[in-house]
């Protein structure tokens, strides 16, 4: 009996390890779509896709596509995002108003502020899209997210780091 219990524990631990590693596995459907578009990308340790855009003014901006998806009423959805910058302390009311006001003018996507483990606050622009997007639409959304975030990065942080 003791042997069966240890075997069961080992199997459960192995299955848990496989599930954890699967969470960090890049989605091959997304790789296929990006490859078809000729988009150069890297994958992060989280299994997400990272695409760097060179802007006309010499700036650079990275957009990310999450491999992990979620489902809402049968629609599989993934997130595209681009970081504008990090506030070392809680963002001021003026900065938050800037982000919220920009949400009003964007036709797709929205600004998000997320607290990091180190106590800083990350400002990023996010677009949630169905997985079955056409290739060109995916490309357009990636570029759009990078453009919006890069403009806000220049405005709020006056740097070119993301």
Image: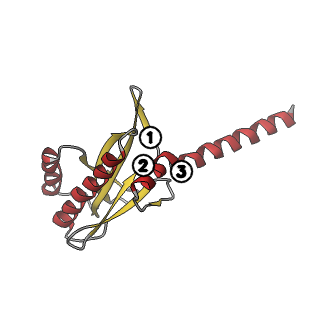
Of callouts 3 and 1, which one flags the residue occurring earlier in the amino acid sequence? 3
Kindly indicate the quadrant of the structure image that contains residue 35.
bottom left
Instruction: From the viewer's side, name the closer residue of 117 and 101.
Output: 101
The quadrant of the picture occupied by the N terminus is: top right
Q: Tell me the residue that label 1 is attached to.
A: 69
**How far from the left and from the top, in percent, is residue 65?**
39, 51
- Please tell me whether mark 3 sits on a helix, a strand or a loop: loop
Residue appearing at x 77%, y 35% in the figure = 8
- Residue sitting at x 43%, y 53%: 36
Q: CA distance from mark 2 to mark 3?
A: 10 Å
Residue at point 30% right, 58% down?
83
Disc 1 is placed on an element classified as loop
Q: Disc 2 on helix, strand or loop?
A: loop
Distance of mark 3 from mark 1, alpha carbons?
12 Å
**Pointer 1 local density, CA inside 10 Å: few below 14, some 14–19, many at least 20:** some
Which quadrant of the structure image shows residue 19? top right
Question: Which residue, given by chain and number where applicable, does mark 3 sit on?
Answer: 24
- Residue 6 in percent (x, y) is at 80, 39
From the top left corner, tell me how far across and down residue 162 is, in percent: 31, 65
Q: Are marks 2 and 1 in contact (CB under 8 Å)?
A: yes
Residue 114 at x, y percent in the picture: 32, 51
The residue under label 2 is: 66
């Amino acid at each position: 009996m003791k042997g069966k219990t240890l075997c069961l524990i080992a199997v459960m631990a192995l299955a848990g390890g496989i599930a954890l590693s699967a969470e960090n596995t890049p989605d091959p459907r997304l790789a296929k779509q990006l490859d078809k578009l000729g988009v150069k990308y890297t994958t992060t340790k989280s299994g997400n896709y990272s695409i760097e855009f060179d802007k006309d003014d010499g700036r650079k901006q990275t957009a990310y596509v999450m491999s992990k998806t979620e489902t809402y009423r049968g629609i599989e959805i993934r997130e595209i995002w681009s970081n504008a910058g990090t506030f070392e302390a809680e963002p001021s009311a003026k900065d938050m108003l800037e982000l919220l006001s920009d949400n009003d003018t964007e036709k797709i996507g929205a600004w998000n502020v997320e607290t990091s483990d180190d106590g800083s606050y990350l400002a990023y622009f996010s677009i949630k899209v169905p997985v079955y997007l056409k290739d060109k639409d995916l490309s357009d959304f990636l570029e759009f997210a990078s453009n919006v975030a890069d403009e806000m990065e220049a405005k709020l942080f006056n740097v070119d780091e993301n």
